[in-house]
C-alpha cells in the first residue's frame, strides 16, 4: 500500500504547486513509483508547472464521474516513467469532488503507487479538505511571514482533528514544515523570522528550507520543476528535502547569508 | 549596510515583533478551536441577561471553558462597575 502525502499551506502563493512538482520529480528520481494529484478543482495549474498541460485529456472529476478509467486519466511524465500526473478539472461545479469519489480514486492510486502526492489548493474549502483528509503525512509549505505562519497553524489544527486518521483514531498525520522563499540575509538583518522562530511558533519541525531564488520562476516558465535544475540553490534544497522525507539524514544548506564584497557593502545591495 | 544607509533610520528588529505577535494570536486561536461552538452565543445571551439588572461593559463578561483532567469547568466572571 502506498503512502499519501499532502502538500498544503492554507495561504495561497506560498509555493504549494512548485513544491508538489519538485517533490514528485524528486521521489521519481529516487526510484519511487509516484502519482501527483491536483486538487485545485476549477483552477488547474500543476500540469503547467510539470510541463504536461497539452497532454491533459481526462481529469480528476472525469474519473470520479466514471467518464473514463483512472488509467486513462493519468498522464505519464516524459522524464520519468514511474511518475504520473492526475490533472484537476476546470469545472465550475464546487461540489464536483465527493468524499466517496475521492476515497475511491485515492485507494486505487494507493494500490498502484508507492507515493500518492496530493497538491492542495489554497484555503480550507472542499478541495483543500479532501487533499488533506486521506493523508498519512503532510508537508505544510510556509513562508517566513505572519499571514502564512498563522494560516499554517489553522491548517495543522484542522488536520489533527478532521483527517481520516483522526476520525478513525489512528496515529496522527505526520507533519513537516517546508520553509520557502527563505532569505538568510534578511534573517540575519532581523527583517525575517528564522527557521527556529517558525518551528517554535508552530511546534512542528522543518524538513527543508528553500531559499528565495530566481530559478523558481524560470522553472515554472519552462515547465521543468526547479528540482531538475541541479545548478540552482532551490533545486538542490528540494533534492535535500526529498532525501529527508525518505528518511535520510542530510544537513541543511543555504542558510548562511552570502558574504558581500567591500564595494557592495560600501554602496549597499 | 551601505554607506548611504547610515543616514537612514534603521527599522527595528521586525522579525522579533512578528514572532511575538504570532505566538500570542496562535495560542489564542488554538484555544478558541477547542471551545464548543455555542460559547459565543452563550456569552452574548448571558451578557443580555446581566445587562437587564446591571449596566456592565461587554468586555466585563468573561466566559471560559477549562479542562481539569476529565472534567470541564465553565467559568463565568463578571466585573461589576464601580459605584
Image: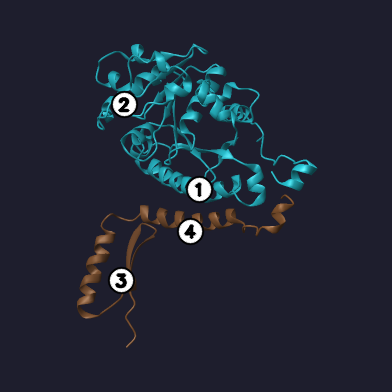
Q: Quadrant of residue A7?
A: top left
Q: Is residue A50 left or right of residue B38?
A: right
Q: Residues within 10 Å of mark 1 (few under 14, many from 20)?
A: some
For the residues labelled 4 and 1, the Cα–Cα distance comes to: 12 Å
Q: Residues within 10 Å of mark 3 (few under 14, many from 20)?
A: few
Residue tagged 3: B58
The answer to whether any part of residue A150 appears in the image is: yes
Q: Residues within 10 Å of mark 4 (few under 14, many from 20)?
A: few
Residue tagged 2: A103
Residue tagged 4: B24
Q: Quadrant of residue A234?
A: top right
For the residues labelled 2 and 4, the Cα–Cα distance comes to: 37 Å
Query: What is the x, y in percent for residue A208?
Result: 58, 35
Q: Are marks 2 and 4 on the same chain?
A: no
Chain B drawn colour: brown
The answer to whether any part of residue A2 appears in the image is: no
Nearer mark to the viewer, of 3 and 1:
3
Nearer mark to the viewer, of 1 and 2:
1
Report the chain shown in cyan: A
Amino acid at each position: 500500500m502506498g503512502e499519501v502525502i499532502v502538500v498544503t499551506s492554507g495561504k495561497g502563493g506560498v509555493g504549494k504547486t512548485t513544491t508538489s512538482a519538485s517533490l514528485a520529480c524528486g521521489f521519481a528520481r529516487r526510484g519511487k513509483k509516484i502519482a501527483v494529484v491536483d486538487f485545485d478543482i476549477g483552477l488547474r495549474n500543476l500540469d503547467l508547472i510539470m510541463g504536461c498541460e497539452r497532454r491533459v485529456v481526462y481529469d480528476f472529476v472525469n474519473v470520479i464521474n466514471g467518464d473514463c478509467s483512472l488509467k486513462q486519466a493519468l498522464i505519464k511524465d516524459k522524464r520519468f516513467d514511474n511518475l504520473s500526473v492526475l490533472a484537476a478539472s476546470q469545472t465550475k461545479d464546487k461540489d464536483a469532488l465527493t468524499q466517496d469519489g475521492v476515497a475511491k480514486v485515492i485507494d486505487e492510486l494507493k494500490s498502484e503507487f508507492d507515493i500518492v502526492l496530493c497538491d492542495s489548493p489554497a484555503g480550507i474549502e472542499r478541495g483543500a479538505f479532501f487533499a488533506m483528509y486521506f493523508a498519512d503525512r503532510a508537508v505544510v509549505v510556509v513562508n517566513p511571514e505572519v499571514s502564512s505562519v498563522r494560516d499554517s497553524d489553522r491548517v495543522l489544527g484542522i488536520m489533527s482533528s478532521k483527517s481520516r486518521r483522526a476520525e478513525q483514531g489512528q496515529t496522527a498525520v505526520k507533519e513537516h514544515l517546508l520553509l520557502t522563499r527563505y532569505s538568510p540575509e534578511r534573517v540575519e538583518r532581523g527583517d525575517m523570522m528564522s527557521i527556529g522562530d517558525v518551528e517554535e511558533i508552530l511546534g512542528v519541525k522543518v524538513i527543508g528550507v528553500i531559499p528565495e531564488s530566481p530559478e523558481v520562476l524560470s522553472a515554472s516558465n519552462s515547465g521543468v520543476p526547479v528540482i531538475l535544475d541541479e545548478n540552482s540553490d532551490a533545486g538542490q534544497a528540494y533534492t535535500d528535502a526529498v532525501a529527508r522525507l525518505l528518511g535520510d539524514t542530510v544537513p541543511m544548506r543555504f542558510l548562511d547569508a552570502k558574504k558581500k564584497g567591500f564595494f557592495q557593502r560600501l554602496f549597499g545591495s | 549596510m551601505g554607506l548611504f544607509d547610515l543616514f537612514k533610520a534603521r527599522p527595528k528588529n521586525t522579525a522579533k515583533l512578528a514572532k511575538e505577535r504570532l505566538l500570542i494570536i496562535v495560542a489564542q486561536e488554538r484555544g478558541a478551536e477547542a471551545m464548543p461552538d455555542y460559547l459565543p452565543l452563550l456569552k452574548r445571551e448571558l451578557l443580555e441577561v446581566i445587562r437587564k439588572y446591571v449596566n456592565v461593559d461587554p468586555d466585563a463578561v468573561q466566559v471560559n471553558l477549562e479542562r481539569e483532567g476529565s472534567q470541564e469547568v465553565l467559568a463565568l466572571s463578571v466585573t461589576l462597575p464601580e459605584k
